[in-house]
Every structure is written in C-alpha cells, then in structure tokens.
Amino acid sequence: MIDWWGPIIHEYYAGSEANGMTFVRADEWLCHPGTVGKAILGKLHICDEAGQVLPPGMEGLVYFEGGNSFTYHNDPEKTAESRNASGWSTLGDIGRVDGDGYLFLTDRKGFMIISGGVNIYPQEIENHLITHPDILDVAVIGGPDPDMGEKVVAVVELSDPSQASPAKAEEIRDFARSALSGVKIPRQIDFIEKLPRAATGKIFKSELRSSYWPADRETR
C-alpha cells in the first residue's frame, strides 16, 4: 500500500479493551517492515507462558502495563486469564519486540497448536504456504491426533479447484519442507472450495476446527 499510495499510511494496534496501544508512521514502518509500532498507551512486555519477561527478539504473549483496566462482561474467568501475576493485561496476541521497541505481531494464542508438547504457531506456516503459486488462500489449524494430541492441518483453497488431488497435497507438503522445520510441516492437507470468512474477510477458524474435532470434545 505504501508503494502504491506513498508514505501516507499509518498503522496502530489496539483492542476495544483499551488496555494499550501502539502506533507507527509510514516512514518508521519502512525502517521496520511488518511492525505495528511502539507503545503510545501503556508499556509493552513480551512474556512466556509462566509470565516471565522475554528479551527482545523472542516471541511470547503481548502484555501492556499501565493501560486502562477492563473486565469482560459476566466472564470473570476470561478476565482473570487476561492478566498475569504482575497485573499486566493481554488481548491474547503473540508477538515480539525488536531492540528499538517496535512490536511485531505473529499470531493469536487461541490459534496455537500443541503437538507432542511443542507449541506451533499457524501464522508462520500460512505465510509460507500462501506464496505457493497454486494456493489462493489457506488456513492452518490443529486437528486431533491419537499420539501427539494435535497435528498440523492445512485447509487449502486452490486457484483452480480442479487441481485438488493427493499429488497436489504432496507437492504442497514438499513446498512447506523447503522453508519450515519438521514439526511445522502439515501432516494433513485438505482442499476446500471456499474458506469460511466474515464480511470483514476474517477466517472463521473456530468453524473450521469444529469440523475436525468430535462434538463431545471441547476444542481450544
């Protein structure tokens, strides 16, 4: 968009909870491609699952300190889950902060796949698969696996649906191997005519996941 319109596009990251906010101008973004900016409301922290602060460059949960306090209506459990021991709050996003304090979002905690005790974030896999010339769109989710608990499943929308075949699935898997580590290679690739999306373009991942998990088993 900046290449198209010029350096007049500015970006921010925040939620309706108003617990924190980052902002970046176009000229800053060009020096830090992919960032959503520096904190202008609250102080940024990246923490591991135990709530410990991680150093620059490492991925973890994005927390804000000192922003506005909030609660989720009639949901004290969800409210409690959004806080750590220090009282900082998170919207459930995964990211990292570089040495200059710029935030880069990488995924959502709720989308994380836990396979054999290993945490796998789908966004990295999706970002690579979408560059395959035959893939129009893709969503990566966790499907049930009797041995590993969950396995990586890629649900693929092809530019030409008639190409869907076991051979095409293996081709896509080989394409994934060219850039991703072994645990991130989709163990299952399914083709779909059209991925379910909201009017805003957001993929309904919960809808996709529900089609893979037994109805009597709660999904993450």
Image: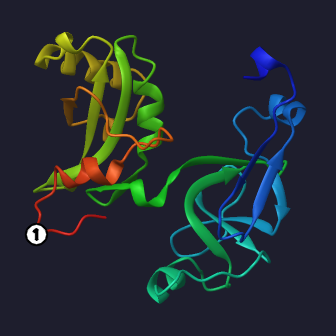
Residue 132 appears left or right of 1:
left
| Quadrant of the rendering where the C terminus is positioned | bottom left
Q: What colour scheme does the image use?
A: rainbow
* Neighbour tally class for label 1: few under 14, some 14-19, many 20 plus, Cα within 10 Å: few
- Depth check, front residue: 204 or 52: 204
Vertical comparison of 92 with 196: above or below: below
Indicate the position of residue 94 as horizontal and vertical percent values: 56, 56
Which residue is found at the position 69% from the left and 35% from the top?
34
Vertical comparison of 82 with 102: above or below: below
Query: Which amino acid type corresponds to the residue marked 1 in the rendered image?
Result: Asp
**Residue 59 visible to an observer of this rendering:** no
Q: How many marks do you count on the picture?
A: 1
Vertical comparison of 155 with 216: above or below: above
- Depth check, front residue: 102 or 134: 134
Residue 27 appears left or right of 202:
right
Residue 162 appears left or right of 72:
left
Which residue is found at the position 36% from the left and 31% from the top?
138
Vertical comparison of 127 with 63: above or below: above
User: Considering the numbered disc 1 on the image, is that residue within a helix, a strand or a loop?
Assistant: loop
Name the residue tied to disc 1: 216
Which residue is found at the position 10% from the left and 57% from the top?
146
Q: Residue furthest front?
A: 199
Which residue is found at the position 46% from the left and 43% from the top?
202
| Quadrant of the rendering where the N terminus is positioned | top right
Indicate the position of residue 160 as horizontal and vertical percent values: 27, 11
- Depth check, front residue: 32 or 192: 192
**Residue 143 visible to an observer of this rendering:** yes
Indicate the position of residue 143 as horizontal and vertical percent values: 21, 50
